[in-house]
Image (cartoon, rainbow, N blue to C red):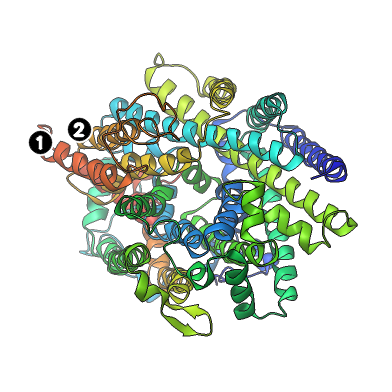
Amino acid sequence: MEKEAGPDAAVMRLDDPWDETTATGWGDPEGAGGIAADGRSRPAGQSGLSAAEIYLEVQSSPVFREVRRRYRRFVVPATTAFLLWYIAYVIAATTAHDLMARPVAGVVNVAMIAGLGQFLTTFLLTWAYVRHARLHRDRAALELRWETQEMTRGAGR
Amino acid sequence: MRGDHQTLALVLFSVFIAVTLGITTWVSRNRHGSAEEFYAGGRLFSPMENGFAIAGDYMSAASFLGISGLIALFGYDGMLYSVGFLVAWLVVLLLVAELVRNCGRFTLADVVAARMAERPVRTAVGASSVTVSVMYLVAQMVGAGSLVALLLGGTSGTARSWTVVGVGALMVIYVSFGGMRATTWIQIVKAVLLMAGAVALTVLVLVRFHGDFNALLTSAAERSGHGRDFLSPGLRYGESWTARFDFISLGLALVLGTAGLPHILSRFYTVPTARAARRSVVWSIGLIGSFYLMTIVLGFGAAALVGSAEVRASNASGNTAVPLLALVLGGGEGSTGGTLLFAVVAAIAFATILAVVAGITLASSASVAHDLYASFRRPGAKQRSEVGVARVAAAAVGVVAIGLGLLAQNLNVAFLVGLAFAVAASANLPALLYSLFWRGFTTRGAVWAVYGGLIPAVLLVLLSPIVSGSPTSLFPGVDIAFFPLENPGLVSIPAGFLAGWIGTVTSSAPPDVAKHAETEVRSLTGAGAA
């Protein structure tokens, strides 16, 4: 379904911006269960709940908590890691001159490797995040979106 | 820089201005005047278009000319900037882009105020957004004046003043008449030009060295006059502990500030979904990352082919390194190739400035009209009038920026960019992250987070050596420099986060649980997104 950001603009144009509605299959096991997983399923718009109650209900539903858990399980360690790596790099670059000046190959030294390493890790983490979101979050989140919107449609605020 | 360059560069400038004005006219042909259209371009840009526009918004002349120049003068220490400017995008991608797209409509304040008592929070976030934008804007306008003077050789004050006025007038026209749609297309055109220019120069540099990066570095080190030290950190930031802490402070501000810049955040509202926002960030990380990699080649190339001493002789802060490099790569002074490449580089730098100032003007007019005006206007005013206010606000912001730009045009205002990032990181980011991720966050916490970051950041700069106490200060005669660092980030960023936390734990009103549920559900699923 979704392409990595590649040069093929034509394909991107095709499956964007509205591809989600068609490309994401309904009824796949990922999002199965729905919000009212405890069997209190109600017809849309007739729940008699206010919007606030609906959002509280969705928030406490197992499906939503799973989406949130997956998001946080990726984002929290990844953010911690890249921030620490960046801060370590900046501190080393400003204070540990001898370490950074040590030659590695030819005139390329530790500092140069570390600097280019920052670029590389940024690209890699971008790729990993997008892949994780596409495989583990997008489908369930989209189903939750439609379900929540169905429920709030008739609700007073 | 002789007559030929000037004429050709002026022709190219005029072509770019004509094209952008054409875009503005074409875009505003059948406008409806809705807020959706003015602030967010109808939300129908594709991720690729938005990715190019984000890159066009972010890569200022300071990065094209400034960073390459710093590398040409100080070697490795210039590279530290490129790394900070790129890594910052991970914060945007992982923590901000999708959630902001899902929760907000037009501005940063939309996201923060959604959970809170609307008026005080909107006022606070709007005020800090406008502050950030105006600082950034003035730095760009003054930069434009000195850049044009530098590239065209005319150092007269009149030429500079007219450049500042002209840039200001153009950005107001783009924004007031074309809104987000014109601004976006101008940024896309600029990003394509900038990337094409950078690729062409990089290829020419690498061809000169037969693709041997090692040889490039070796001859850069030789011609710099510093030898091997040129290739390792320390030439600029290694002399004293003050300098070291100053850079650490700036590094923090760069990495955390990008995610709080109003003109970057407003770009995410121009795509239809959070997933499209994510993919635009991926595009922009690819573009920005490869651009900064190329500035490294250009910087070392300038040191190797032009020589650090000559770069410094032309401009003390290195801003002419890339134009001089273009001259050499094209065949040298007086050759057709050299003249052509030089003029092209000058025109790209000018295009860069115009696109960046247009983006910032639009974001600040949105903050004024959608946040500040909207929270003070009488109830019942129609939405149509808000866009009218935004158009007028764009003109007002333009007038203020022109005025400040003229006042500051002989001062060294390069610090303003670092300061804008520091304020964004200290005031906007804590409020934004807390409201997205902290269940217990309250109205008082939000207001305190914004002011608790904004006020220390501005105060510390007033008390820093930038303003007083040294011969290079804005006011050399006075001495109230109690704070040793030029960038306040190291103190003001923790202060903003701390103030938000204290404000929250001491607030008497409990957090609104239902509103938090709504923010969390909407941010992660996109339910009810505009």
> Which chain letter matches label 1?
B
Identify the residue shown where x is 29% and y is 51%.
B520
> Which chain letter matches label 2?
B
How far apart are the two marked residues, 2 and 1, measured between alpha carbons? Answer: 9 Å
Identify the residue shown where x is 36% and y is 59%.
A144
Dividing the picture into quadrants, the one containing residue B142 is top right
Dividing the picture into quadrants, the one containing residue A52 is top left
Q: Residue furthest bottom?
A: A105
- Circle 1 SS class: loop
User: Disc 1 residue type?
Assistant: Thr
Q: Is residue A83 visible?
A: yes
Residue where numbered disc 2 is placed: B444
Q: State the quadrant of the C terminus of chain A.
A: top left
- Circle 2 SS class: helix
Q: Do callouts 2 and 1 mark residues in contact (Cβ within 8 Å)?
A: yes
Q: Tell me if residue A41 comes above or below residue B393 in the rendering.
A: below
Q: Tell me if residue A152 comes above or below residue A40 in the rendering.
A: above
Identify the residue shown where x is 62% and y is 33%.
B179
Dot placed on the residue nearer the N-terminal end, 2 or 1? 2
From the top left corner, tell me how far across and down residue A93 is, in percent.
38, 65
Front residue of B94/B157: it is B157
Could you say which disc has been placed on residue B506 in the image? Answer: 1
Front residue of B522/B6: it is B6
User: Disc 2 residue type?
Assistant: Arg
